[in-house]
Image (tube, helix red, strand yellow):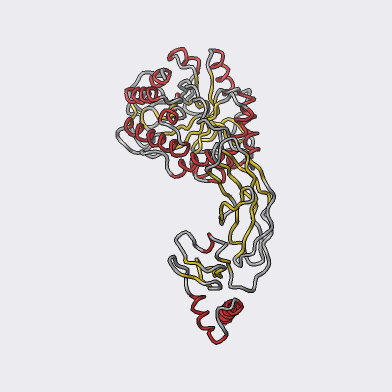
Amino acid sequence: MRLRSRLTALLTGAALALTGAGLVTAPTAHAAVQQVAAAWAPGTSYAAGTVVTYNGVSYVCLQSHTSQAGWEPPNVPALWRAGTGGGDSAAPSAPGNLRSTGVTSSSVSLAWNAATDNVGVTGYQVYRGGTQVATVTGTTYTDTGRAAATSYTYTVRARDAAGNLSAPSNAVTATTATGGGPGPAPARMPGAPYLYMGWGSPPNPGTVMDTTGVRSFTMAFILSGGGCNPAWDGQRPLTGGTDQQAINTIKSKGGSVQVSFGGWSGNKLGPNCSSPQAFADAVQRVIDAVGPAVVDFDIENTDEFANYTVQDRILNGLKIVKADNPNVKVVVTFGTTRTGPDEHGVRLINRSRELGVPIDNYTIMPFNFGGSNLYQDTVNASEGLKNALKNAFGWSDAQAYARMGISGMNGLSDQQELTTPATWTQIRDWARDRGLTRLAYWAVNRDRPCPGGGVAAHCSGIAQSDWEFTRITAGF
């Protein structure tokens, strides 16, 4: 019953609107009903006052014209007004807290708080310098194609289904980054296999350094020790324990450390820190305690990699970390398919560009495919990463390679894939020849022989000499 009454009122309102425009008289109201029911279409002649529907919304023609593709009613407010001419006249509230969430040399990213309306907000009109540049349905927008080192001022207005516009939001001014490419390529980081002091009979790093010549290790893992508080493995203190002892030994022999946050399992800081600033503060406590040359963010699993709210929190936090520690390199490490990053990895790369995050190196983990040729799988996955970086940033091959890294798995992987010392040498040489700037593997703890031992924490599962993979990595 209510549906029929509502339809009758709608058609009556449309007829009155057309009558008021001088296009129909009361006896021809049936024609107005036909117009209300008709869907907008390109290549059609519309008279002022004609009512059409588009995507379930009614629109009234404001100026006579012949429609064209691209002139859909919501795209041309000069030609169409949403609504049927009566009823809702209440404008939405103004969008709140318009802000810039990131810039590049050619784009400005914006976000704002949602407006409210007595019926419902249907979209937002974005203005640059007083000129409308976009209509969006969400509360974010990236304005691309901008000039480098240039300031732009934006406002946003909310719109409802009846075409009522809110007052403008607050104005925000953002300045695009200086152009000229991605900046100097980061220097190659020394080969740095992972060392995990809470797992798999960890070796003395001094002994490994003396035997292999390796000068750096990636220390794993910083997790949440409760809330947004960092701790080694989520339980060991940042200073005064076995991790600090290992780091002191490495530094006493002239080496350096990379500190890795996250990983596949455990309680991580990304989901536990409430904001980018809180995440950055947690990372800063680790930097202050450890003094790393590199911070590595191993973003995996559904709690960080596939959770885009957490992805954004980490990325925005890394902007703060880099700004506060310009001499510390920032690395993100994530999984891959045989042909390159999956949808989550591509999103992470594209989002880092949109937000203007100064990441020094994007490292992939090319294993656990269940394949039989780890060298070729690694090359193919790395080429896919290169292409994703080129697509996101417009870089050349050389520029993309210079921001890339490989983190492998020695011996047998979790999927029983085999990486022999000879295969790892091939991978190292390919990475070095292409100009990649990071090489790591999981893990020094496993760099010992145990042929037939399977996938183990203390050995590789294959025949090899002690620390053979580390010796190869040291040659990077």
Q: Quadrant of residue 315?
A: top right
Residue 267, can we see it? no
Please provide percent x and percent y for residue 233. 56, 32
For residue 59, above or below residue 292: below
Apparent side of residue 35 relative to residue 22 in the rendered image (left or right): left
- Quarter of the picture containing the C terminus is top left
Residue in the image at 54% along x and 13% along y = 254
At 45% across and 62% down in the image, what residue appears?
A: 68
Position in image of residue 288 (x %, y %): 64, 25
Residue farthest left in this picture: 372
Residue 291 sits above or below residue 101 on the image: above
Q: Give the residue displayed 43% in from the left and 18% down from the top.
A: 474
Counting from the top left corner in percent of width and height, residue 440 is at 44, 26
Q: For this view, does 138 lie left or right of residue 201?
A: right
In the image, taking residue 69 as reference, residue 22 lies left or right, namely right
Q: Which of the pair 337/185 is nearer the observer?
A: 185
Name the residue rendered at 53%, 46% in the picture. Answer: 307
Q: Quadrant of the N terminus?
A: bottom right
* Residue 150 image-quadrant placement: top right
Residue 329: in sight, yes or no? yes
Residue 159, position as x, y percentages in the image: 62, 61
Q: Please tell me whether residue 16 is drawn above or below residue 230 in the rendered image.
A: below
